[in-house]
Image (tube, coloured by chain):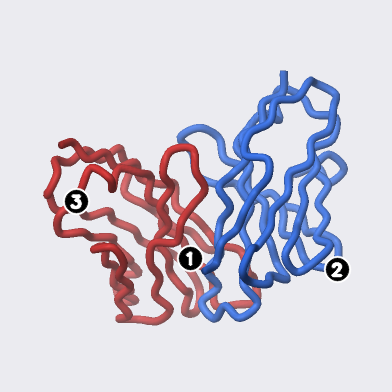
């Protein structure tokens, strides 16, 4: 149980284009999902908190117009990197917080490797 | 604010050696504590958790005990295997309304045959 999928797992795009990454909770519902960015050999950096049916909450320094988040249902959140540039190349990981979680554990997707050329 | 301090890596052990990865935290109230593991090129997997003082989380031979008096949650395993090679993250969730996890910096473990 508690499986989270991400699609695509790997994407290469040209500078200036937009890329959409999907995050799905497969066997549970989640009103809250999180988007992280991870640089090589570093910890996870929280980008934003995605709440079903409402606007995402972005961390300081994260451009909301560049990283568009939509949480349209209890099992799906999407992150769109708009007008991507090479510095946006990174490993993006989502996580989902189950509705019935008492401890607050998050379940993570396998990550999406974005390369902008 | 909340913070998690992890033992710096990398850690290299021989197969069947004893493992300890230290983790201490700073938080108000009574946080929940977690250990996550990340294998190369993958997302994080929840390894174990503890929600109150003196709780022991355990899974796959790994254990960690929530010590409020020392604000610690050290990860241990009695006999590591090559397949345990990964990055280990300690994390906490505060007892307030915030839902975010606060992560440590991660510890790279390499187990040699």
Circles 1, 2 touching at the beta carbon (< 8 Å): no
Tag 1 secondary structure: strand
Say whether mark 2 and mark 1 are on the same chain: no
The correct choice, above or below, for A86 with respect to B95 in the image is above
The x and y percentages for residue B50 are 39, 75
Q: Nearer the viewer, residue A24 or B3?
A: A24
Q: Nearer the viewer, residue A8 or A92?
A: A8
Q: Quadrant of residue B14?
A: top left
Local crowd size for mark 2, using a 10 Å CA cut-off: few (<14), some (14–19), many (≥20): few
B14 displayed left or right of B5 = left
Chain letter, colour blue: A
For mark 2, what is the residue? A53
Palette colour of chain B: red
Q: Quadrant of residue A61?
A: top right
- Chain at numbered mark 3: B
Q: Nearer the viewer, residue B5 or B65?
A: B65
Residue B1 appears in view: no
Q: Nearer the viewer, residue B18 or A76?
A: A76
Q: Which mark is residue B92?
A: 1
Tag 3 secondary structure: loop
Q: CA distance from mark 3 to mark 1?
A: 25 Å
Taking the spot 59% from the left edge, 44% from the top edge, the residue there is A111
């Amino acid at each position: 149980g508690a499986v989270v999928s991400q699609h695509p797992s790997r994407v290469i795009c040209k500078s200036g284009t937009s890329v959409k990454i999907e995050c799905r909770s497969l066997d549970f519902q989640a009103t809250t999902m999180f988007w992280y960015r991870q640089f090589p050999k570093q910890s996870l950096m929280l980008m934003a908190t995605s709440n079903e049916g409402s606007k995402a909450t972005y961390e300081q320094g994260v451009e909301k117009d560049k990283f568009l988040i939509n949480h349209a249902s209890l099992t799906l959140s999407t992150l769109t990197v708009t007008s991507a540039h090479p510095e946006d190349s990174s490993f993006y990981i989502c996580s989902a917080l189950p509705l019935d979680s008492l401890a607050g554990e998050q379940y993570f997707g396998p990550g999406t490797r974005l390369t902008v050329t | 604010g909340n913070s998690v301090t992890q033992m710096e890596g990398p850690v290299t052990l021989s197969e069947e050696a004893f493992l300890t990865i230290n983790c201490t935290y700073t938080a108000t109230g009574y946080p929940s504590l977690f250990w996550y593991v990340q294998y190369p090129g993958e997302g994080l997997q929840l390894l174990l958790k503890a929600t109150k003082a003196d709780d022991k989380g355990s899974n796959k031979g790994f254990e960690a005990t929530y010590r409020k008096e020392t604000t610690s949650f050290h990860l241990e395993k009695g006999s590591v295997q090559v397949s345990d090679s990964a990055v280990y993250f300690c994390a906490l969730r505060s007892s307030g309304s915030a839902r975010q996890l606060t992560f440590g910096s991660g510890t790279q473990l390499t187990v040699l045959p």
